[in-house]
Image: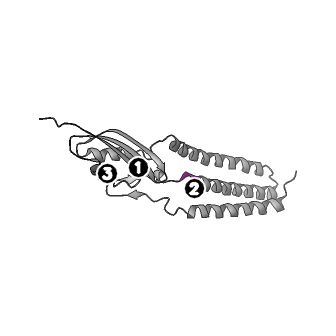
Amino acid sequence: MPIRFAEAIPIACLGLAVNIASAWLLGGGDHDHHRHEHDDHHHIHHGARRDNNIRAAIIHVTADAAVSILVITGLLLARTFGWLWMDPLAGMIGAIVIASWSYGLVRDTSAILLDMTPDAALPHSLRELIEQDGDRISDLHLWRLGPGHLGVILAITTEQSRDHRFYREKLAGFPALSHVTIEIERTVARAS
C-alpha cells in the first residue's frame, strides 16, 4: 500500500504539536523539580523528591514527540527522495529511544518498590551526625515513603541521658525525613 504523504505528514505534525504542548504542561507543574534541599549540614538528593508518576507521563509524551520528529523526517525523505525505507527505519529508531527511556524509569521505580535508599550518601550523613557526640547507631533503616518524604528507624546506643527529642532536633536538618522512629539503648559509662 503506498504512503499517502499529503495526509501522513500533516497528521504527524499535529501529533508533534500535541506532544510538545503536553510535555510543556506536565513539566510546568513541577517548577522546582531540579531544586535540591540544603541546610547547614546536609544535602538531600532530589531522587527522594522525584514523582515517578509525573516523570512517566513526561517521558511518555517526550518519547512520542521524539518519535513524531523521526516519523516526519522519514516521511519527508521518503517523499522527496523516494527512500521508502526511511519510514520503517524511523519506527525502529523510535522504538530504541522509547526502550532506553523506559529502562531508566523502570530501574528507578523498581528501586522504590524494593525499598532501596534513594540517596546512597544519606545513611552516612545520618550516622556521621548522630555519632559525632560519642553515640553509636546500632541499626538504621531508611526508605522512601513518597516524593520528597523518607522514613527512618534509628536504634541509638548512648552513655548519655538523652531522649528522643534530642535526636529529633539533630535530625531537623533533614527536611525529607517525614517519619522518624528512634529507639534508644542506654549503656553504663565505663570507668577509666
- Label 3 neighbourhood size at 10 Å, few (<14), some (14-19), many (20+)? some
- Label 2 neighbourhood size at 10 Å, few (<14), some (14-19), many (20+)? some
Residue of label 1: 179
Q: Is mark 1 on a helix, strand or loop?
A: strand
Q: Give the range drawn in magenta.
A: 49-53
Q: Which of marks 3 and 2 is in front?
A: 3
Q: Is mark 3 on a helix, strand or loop?
A: helix
Frontmost residue, 143 versus 15: 143
Query: Of label 1 and label 2, which has the lower sequence position?
Result: 2
Image quadrant in which you'd find residue 78: bottom right
Instruction: Locate residue 183, reporting x and y percent.
Output: 32, 42
Question: Residues at badges 3 and 2 in contact (C-beta under 8 Å)?
Answer: no
The verdict on residue 51 being magenta is yes
Q: In the visual, does 148 lie left or right of 160?
A: right
Q: In the visual, does 121 lie left or right of 157?
A: right
Q: How is the image coloured?
A: one colour
